[in-house]
Image (cartoon, rainbow, N blue to C red):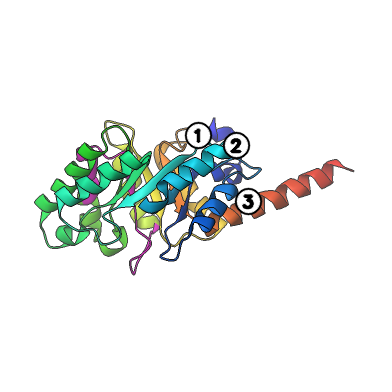
Amino acid sequence: MPSAQEPLQRLPGLIDLTSLNEDDTPDRIEALCRLAAGPFGPPAALCVYPEYVLLARRTLDALGLNTVAVASVANFPDGGADADRVARACRRLRAAGADEVDVVLPYRSLQAGEVGAFRRVADAARAATADGVLKCILETGLLSEAQIDQACSIALDAGADFLKTSTGKASAHASPQAAERMLLAVRDCDRAPGVKVAGGIRSVEQALGYLAQADRVLGVGQVDARRFRLGASALFDAVLAELGGVHASIVGQEAY
């Protein structure tokens, strides 16, 4: 059970190891896949741009990491309000082999009070990913508390598997305040969806803070990769480095 493990040991399996850079290359994606084969357990998923979905899947499988999901992004990062375009993008990602689709919902529509447009995109994304995992990106750093609550409600009503804080491309990223509202929303849902915190998370301390928050709201023993994720790239390196230091320290102590 998750509650029996030290928080640091739980982190690798809760991370969506991410590379969404404009200068990504096949070599970089392959290196990311190799990083996922670290000694402390694989990440929950590898998140890449659509053009690298097939490469990521093939590379992970070749490394024996067939349990690691491949995620990709749609309507990213702009969050347009064209529901048909979003549905097409989602279907293409699923056809290309993406297990999970992270869709930016039209947060500007929500800001403008155009709730119908926001709802149509959420519904279209769910219909197009009916047999996969749908993560709805709300861009919470640009929304008020009331708008975050409204976005959570609409996305969950549409059938989102995860609520995700941010694209990481906006002027404001994830925050504990936004994560709290999202965790409360999934806790009170009649299903068991999850929360993905992403955007600006670089330190192990930050990650452990969000994990403790999830444990508190959802309940110790309830938090695994089906209920909680952290979207990051540099964070995975930092976690592995800290785990390596702890492991070396323990081995050193046992030698005496």
Q: Is residue 18 in sight in this rendering?
A: yes
* Residue 7 percent location from the top left of the image: 57, 44
Between 51 and 187, the residue placed more toward the observer is: 51
> Closest to the observer: 117 or 64?
64
The residue at the point 51 percent across, 61 percent down is 202
In terms of image quadrants, where is residue 238?
A: bottom right
Residue 114 is labelled as: none
Q: In this picture, which residue range is highlighted in magenta?
A: 151-175
Q: Earlier in the sequence, mark 2 or mark 1?
A: 2
Q: Pointer 1: what residue?
A: 67
Residue, disc 3:
240
Name the residue located 25 percent from the left edge and 54 percent from the top edge: 148
Question: Relative to residue 193, is residue 47 drawn left or right?
Answer: right
The N terminus sits in image quarter: top right
Residue 106 position, x and y percent, is 20, 56
Left or right of 219 on screen, residue 6? right
**Labels 3 and 1 touching (C-beta < 8 A):** no
Residue 154 is at least partly visible in this image: no
Q: As rendered, which of 116 and 33 lies closer to the eye?
A: 33
First reached walking from the N terminus: tag 3 or tag 1 = 1
> Quick check: 176 left or right of 29?
left
Q: Nearer the viewer, mark 3 or mark 2?
A: 3
User: Dot 2: within a 10 Å radius of its alpha carbon, few (fewer than 14), some, or many (20 or more) residues?
Assistant: few
Residue for badge 2: 5
Crowd tier of the residue under label 1, counting other residues whose Cα lies within 10 Å: few below 14, some 14–19, many 20 or above: few
Estimate how packed mark 3 is, as few (under 14), some (14 to 19) or many (20 or more) residues with alpha carbons within 10 Å.
many
- Camera-side mark, 2 or 1: 1
Q: Amino acid at mark 3?
A: Leu
